[in-house]
Amino acid sequence: MRSKKKFVIFAHSGTYDKLYQIVTLAITAASMGRETYIFLFFWALRRFVNEEFDVTKLSNEFGEEGARLSKRMQEINPVSLKEILYEVKKMGNLKVYACTTAVKLMELEESLVKSRVDDILGLTTMLEIADGAETQLFI
């Protein structure tokens, strides 16, 4: 019997456009029945832990276009990213993990992090989980 297809996202960036992409790709893959994992590092980790999914902080590189892009993204998908993510997580095939070292580097309270993710893992464990994944993305 063949196991489910695996979909893995190594999430690094905390700008809204990339966070939007991380969440929408993950929920789509999970909704399609894929075993889906989000591994959180640095600014993506901070945004997840602080539950700042819908704070539309875009990269400075977007300049004035950033405000228009942010508005369009909210018009196309007006439902909160946080709400969608937690709803899809209830299906059971979407897991969110924080990197042990990133928790320390970002000076986040471990108990708060543990309340927001499925677990805090080291890189070795993350790579073991990701092994054999049909799709691996770094965002």
Image (spheres, rainbow, N blue to C red):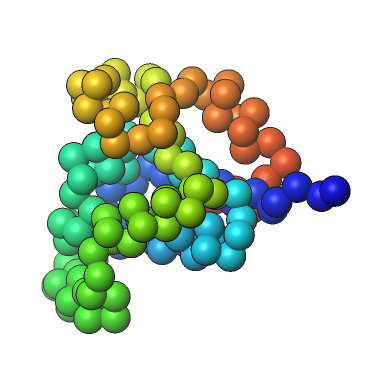
Instruction: Tell me if residue 105 comes above or below residue 8 in the rendering.
Output: above
Q: Residue at x 19, y 59 (%)?
A: 54
Query: In the rendered view, does 46 fall on the left or right side of 119?
Result: left
* Image coordinates for residue 131, horizontal then vertical, percent: 68, 36
* Image coordinates for residue 39, horizontal then vertical, percent: 46, 38
Instruction: Tell me if residue 84 comes above or below residue 100 in the rendering.
Output: below
Query: In the rendered view, does 54 fall on the left or right side of 36?
Result: left
Query: In the rendered view, does 12 fall on the left or right side of 83?
Result: right
Tell me which corner region of the image, top left, top right, bottom left or bottom right, holds residue 23: bottom left
* Image coordinates for residue 38, horizontal then vertical, percent: 46, 44
Residue 135 seen in this snapshot: yes
Q: Residue at x 42, y 51 (%)?
A: 90
Q: State the residue lying farthest toward the right.
A: 1
Q: Residue at x 67, y 45 (%)?
A: 133
Query: In the rendered view, does 6 fall on the left or right side of 59?
Result: right
* Image coordinates for residue 5, horizontal then vertical, percent: 69, 53
